[in-house]
Image (cartoon, rainbow, N blue to C red):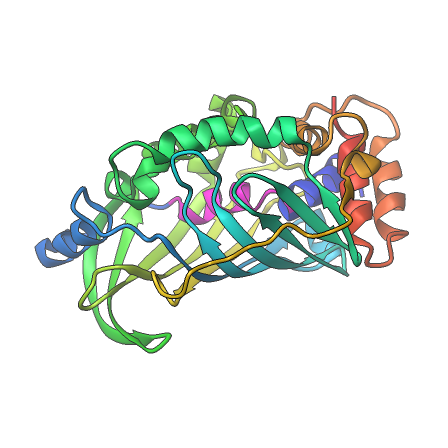
């Protein structure tokens, strides 16, 4: 594998967001359904009931074509409780993750108490540096204070980019009667929303979602289906599913060298929505995350991911070094963090 291909593996594994971008992009030729539009308005509009807490189970799977196929499917699964951000605090959550990358499985968990952040990796707990957490609290806390419901308060407005909604019947999801709505996506509006969210969460929007990357993503998708399940009575989001096929015209068109195309499946389910209170306690005896990432802590790790997306790693033996690091990890999740930090510009 080439240096760029190896860098791509890191980005796909750590950049759930970037893969979701591809998954959400599709055409906008579907015929609109007035009743489906009303249901979406009730779920995501100004009068919608906010989702304050619940449990999430989300899975992303990429089946790549091209050189990346040599590493097999890439998947990430997140499960656990969450609570929405408040005026002063970050979201609270305790999310376990399981990732498959280059034929190896890595696991751990991410924890936020609202004022502190932690990563559990390989039976060890690491504390995210307070400076980075303070920056997140400032950006997301201000957004949460705005008088808008749910995702919209963070700059994500599905009503702007779900197009041509159609009713697809009734189904029961996690013990709740739901209405299923299918639709397509306005690509440019979705990318603008995600850039806004990234900027609020540490100012990474401009570096990750460059104009060139936006165009490459929009041009690559061949087919996509997006489905939303909303509560039949309360109109609260219960499930989201996307299946997409994509292909780049040639190697020069791909933002991730070695990825020619493939299939992405994304599914997220919400249980116990606005149910039991979510309590997250700070783990004891946490060690500084800088032990893995260096002086910059989580910022250094995220910069490394950004460098991979933007192609910011210069020529040399970085790819081979990353491959050695990854293959020698033996399922040690902390090693992925170390290797990503080495890509930081």
Residue 10 place in picture, x, y as percent: 71, 43
Image x and y of residue 173, in percent = 34, 73
Q: Is residue 129 visible?
A: yes
Where are the magenta residues, as a range? 14-25
Above or below: residue 250 compared with residue 54 = above
Left or right of residue 112: residue 290: right
User: How far from the left and from the top, in percent, is residue 106?
Assistant: 74, 58
Please check the rendered image and state whether residue 173 is part of the magenta-colored stretch, yes or no.
no
> Does residue 192 appear left or right of residue 256 in this picture?
left
Is residue 12 shown above or below 171?
A: above
Residue nearer the viewer, 143 or 255? 143
- Name the image quarter holding the N terminus: top right
Compare residues 302 and 30 and report the one nearer the observer: 302
Rendered view: 271 above or below 13: below
Which residue appears at 61% of the width and 50% of the height? 111
Question: How many marks on residues?
Answer: 0
Res 3 quadrant in image: top right
| 300 relative to 51 in the view: left or right | right
Q: Give the image location of residue 112, x and y in percent.
A: 57, 46
Q: Is residue 23 magenta?
A: yes
Q: Measuring 31% from the left and 45% from the top, which residue is drawn there?
A: 150
Q: Can residue 310 be seen in the rendering of this structure?
A: no
Q: Main secondary structure of the magenta part?
A: helix
**Of residues 20 and 151, which is closer to you in this image?**
151
Tell me the quadrant of the picture where the C terminus can be found: top right
Residue plotted at (71% across, 48% down): 67
49 left or right of 18 in image: left
């Amino acid at each position: 594998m080439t240096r760029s291909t190896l860098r791509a593996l890191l980005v796909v594994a750590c950049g759930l967001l970037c893969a979701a971008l591809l998954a959400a992009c599709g055409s906008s030729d579907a015929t609109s359904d007035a009743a489906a539009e009303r249901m979406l308005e009730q779920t995501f509009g100004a009068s919608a009931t906010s989702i304050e807490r619940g449990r999430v189970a989300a899975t992303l799977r990429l089946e790549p074509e091209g050189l990346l196929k040599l590493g097999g499917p890439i998947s990430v699964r997140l499960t656990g409780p969450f609570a929405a951000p408040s005026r002063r605090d970050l979201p609270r959550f305790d999310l376990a993750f399981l990732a498959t990358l280059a034929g190896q499985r890595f696991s751990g968990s991410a924890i936020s108490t609202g004022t502190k952040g932690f990563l559990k990796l390989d039976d060890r707990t690491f504390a995210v540096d307070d400076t980075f957490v303070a920056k997140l609290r400032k950006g997301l806390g201000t957004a949460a204070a705005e008088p808008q419901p749910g995702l919209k308060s963070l700059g994500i407005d599905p009503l702007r980019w779900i197009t041509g909604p159609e009713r697809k019947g009734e189904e029961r999801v996690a013990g709740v009667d739901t209405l299923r709505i299918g639709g397509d996506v306005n690509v440019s509006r979705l990318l603008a929303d995600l850039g806004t969210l990234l900027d609020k969460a540490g100012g990474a929007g401009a570096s990750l979602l460059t104009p060139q990357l936006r165009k490459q993503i929009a041009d690559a998708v061949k087919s996509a289906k997006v489905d939303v399940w909303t509560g039949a009575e309360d109109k609260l989001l219960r499930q989201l599913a996307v299946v997409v096929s994509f292909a780049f015209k040639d190697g020069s068109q791909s933002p991730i060298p070695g990825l020619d195309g493939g299939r992405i499946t994304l599914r997220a389910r919400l249980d116990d929505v606005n149910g039991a209170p979510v309590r997250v306690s700070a783990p004891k005896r946490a060690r500084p995350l800088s032990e893995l990432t260096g002086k910059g802590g989580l910022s250094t790790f995220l910069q490394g991911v950004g460098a991979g997306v933007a192609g910011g790693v210069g020529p040399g033996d970085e790819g081979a070094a990353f491959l050695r690091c990854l293959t020698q990890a033996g399922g040690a999740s902390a090693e992925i963090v170390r290797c990503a930090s080495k890509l930081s510009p």
